[in-house]
Image (cartoon, rainbow, N blue to C red):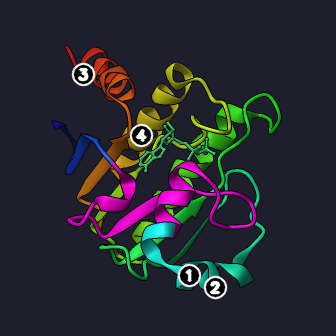
Amino acid sequence: MTTCKIDAIELELRNGDIAQQSDIEAVVNAANAQLRMGGGVAGAIHRAAGPGLEKECRPLAPIKPGEAVITGAHNLPNLYVIHCLGPVYGVDRPEDQLLADCYRNALKLAEKKEISSIAFPAISTGAFGYPIEEAIPLAIDTITAHAGRLKSLKRIAMVLFSNRDYRAHENYLNQKFKS
Ligand code: ADP
């Protein structure tokens, strides 16, 4: 696990499954517009949460790219799930702004609920095709740009599924904070 301190926030990189972050209050779902089960992150989260999550999501759907909504976590070991719809690369434009909006809106919702810890997956970098090298600076720069203004949030984790994605995030952090 890699950690770095940004203002009062601890930013952590973790290699693992977003559905198994038991020390985190809110996990972020890389959702689909209908807030249904799906594959990847949405599959892992809905499978672990159980059918109550889809039921709670139904009246909140559909959501638009860049938007975020919050629900309970049902059978997940967390208090909340924040569902973000990332942009489909090359389709939803401007994709960089929409991806940054996901992180911004998730942080905003977390602050509103006075959440102290949040875990993000690498939104849009799976089925939605966003190249990881382009998504990393957007995710990390958006989080770090907001760090100084966060009140309730103390810990932000980025949960990376593959070793390769973990290392790519680690490289970016090392490069950004090396001086
Ligand atoms: P999107 O549709 O927003 O692209 P995906 O769920 O397809 O979302 O993938 C987003 C990223 O999450 C990809 O990098 C994928 O490798 C990763 N991923 C897939 N399953 C998990 C999981 N269980 N925990 C954390 N990350 C995951």
In whole angstroms, how far apart are the C-alphas of marks 2 and 3?
A: 43 Å
Q: Nearer the viewer, residue 41 or 2?
A: 41
Left or right of 59 in this view: 1? left
Q: Earlier in the sequence, mark 2 or mark 3?
A: 2
User: Which residue type carries mark 1?
Assistant: Pro
Marks 2 and 1 in Cβ contact (< 8 Å): yes
Tell which of 86 and 175 is nearer to you: 86
Residue 34 visible in image: yes
Image height check: is 88 above or below 58? above
Q: Nearer the viewer, residue 118 or 74?
A: 74
Tell me which label, 3 or 1, sits earlier in the chain: 1
Q: Earlier in the sequence, mark 4 or mark 3?
A: 4
Secondary structure of the residue carrying tag 2 is helix
Residue 56, image x and y in percent?
61, 85
Give the SS element for disc 3. Answer: loop
User: Disc 2 or disc 3, which is closer to the eye?
Assistant: 2
* Tag 1 residue: 51
- The residue positioned 44% from the left and 33% from the top of the image is 141
Please report the bounds of the magenta region as a residue range: 17-46
Q: Residue at x 41, y 34 (%)?
A: 140
Residues packed near mark 3 inside 10 Å, few (<14), some (14 to 19) or many (20 plus): few
Element type at marker 4? Answer: helix
Query: Which residue matches tag 4?
Result: 145
The quarter of the image holding the C terminus is: top left
- The residue singled out by tag 2 in the image is 55
Residue 32 shown in magenta = yes
